[in-house]
């Protein structure tokens, strides 16, 4: 077990209860999919898991440590080294090449030199079929290529946890299958992959599937 949530609740504007008593555990080496329609709290839950939203009540344990006991600098270090983020809209810097985008998370990672980071980034881009796109700007890449760059950026620091928010929402069928196969392979290699989506066709890739409805999470 790498993550354990106990009675997590999230309320906005004092009376909008988005998450209601979430209890769940996540393990390394498994691919989790959380289903649910828009507005049911999927992204809110993912933001809490990613330590981006700290306004919740309840207990969040990461590697058996209670995250509310950690300092802001410790949380920032965890986000940089232990958690990788993949989003539907890629969030690539349009002024940077594919390689430069991938290298962004390594800039503040003191555990890897800039030379080693560049070598690793190029190797990963090659592995994901982007060897001819290394020096291209995002505007010249297809949707599938952008998402693969985003995945490489997410794993460049070798995080234990990959959080994916509708990562195939903007992709065609072929690119969707490619991205899902990559995420599945990442989980098979010992990482914890947690993805939120409303696309029921993707649950075939998951080891466990949950449904989030009206703030309540249940295993399917």
Image: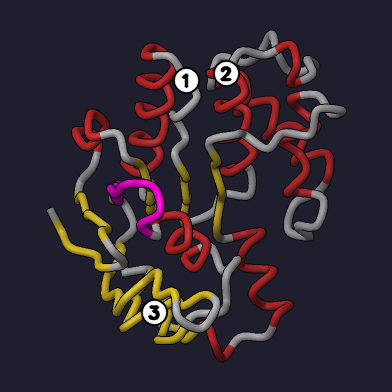
Image-based side of 126 in relation to 189, left or right: right
Relative to 2, 163 lies left or right: right
**Lower position in the chain sequence, tag 2 or tag 3:** 3
Highlighted magenta segment, given as a residue range? 31-40
Q: CA distance from mark 2 to mark 3?
A: 35 Å
Query: SS of the residue at dot 3?
Result: strand
Residue in front for this viewpoint, 15 or 96: 15
Is 118 located above or below residue 69 in the figure? Answer: above
Q: Position of residue 29 (x, y in %)?
A: 31, 51
Q: Is residue 11 above or below residue 121?
A: below
Expressed as whole percent of the image width and height from the top left, the position of residue 116 reads 76, 40
Residue 86 is covered by the magenta coloring: no
Q: Residue furthest bottom?
A: 69
Comparing 20 with 23, the one in front is 20
Determine contact: label 1, label 2, CB under 8 Å: yes
> Which residue is denoted by mark 3 in the rendering?
9
**Side of 49 where 216 appears, left or right:** left
Q: Which residue is drawn at the image coordinates 56% and 26% (left, top)?
A: 148
Picture residue at 40% right of the left edge, 21% below the top: 176
Task: Tell me the distance, in whole angstroms, between the alpha carbons under discs 3 and 1.
Answer: 32 Å
The residue tagged 1 is 171
Q: How far across and down, in percent of the image, does residue 177 sit?
A: 35, 20
- Occupied quadrant, residue 153: top right
- Residue at 45% across / 81% down in the picture? 15
């Amino acid at each position: 077990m790498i993550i354990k949530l106990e009675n997590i609740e999230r309320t906005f504007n004092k009376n909008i209860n988005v998450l209601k008593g979430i209890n769940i555990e996540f393990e390394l080496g498994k691919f989790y999919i959380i289903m649910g329609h828009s507005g049911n709290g999927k992204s809110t839950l993912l933001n809490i898991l990613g330590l981006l939203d700290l306004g919740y009540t309840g207990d969040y344990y990461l590697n058996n440590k209670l995250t509310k006991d950690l300092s802001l600098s410790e949380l920032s270090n965890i986000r940089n080294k232990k958690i990788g983020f993949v989003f539907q809209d890629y969030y690539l810097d349009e002024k940077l090449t594919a390689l430069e985008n991938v290298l962004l998370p390594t800039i503040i990672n003191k555990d890897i030199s800039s030379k080693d980071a560049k070598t690793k980034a190029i190797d990963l881009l090659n592995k994901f079929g982007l060897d001819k796109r290394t020096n291209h700007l995002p505007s010249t890449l297809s949707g599938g290529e952008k998402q693969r760059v985003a995945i490489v950026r997410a794993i460049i620091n070798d995080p234990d946890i990959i959080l994916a928010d509708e990562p195939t929402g903007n992709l065609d069928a072929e690119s969707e299958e490619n991205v899902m196969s990559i995420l599945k392979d990442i989980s098979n290699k010992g990482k914890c992959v947690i993805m939120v989506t409303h696309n029921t066709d993707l649950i075939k890739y998951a080891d466990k599937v949950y449904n989030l409805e009206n703030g309540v999470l249940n295993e399917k």
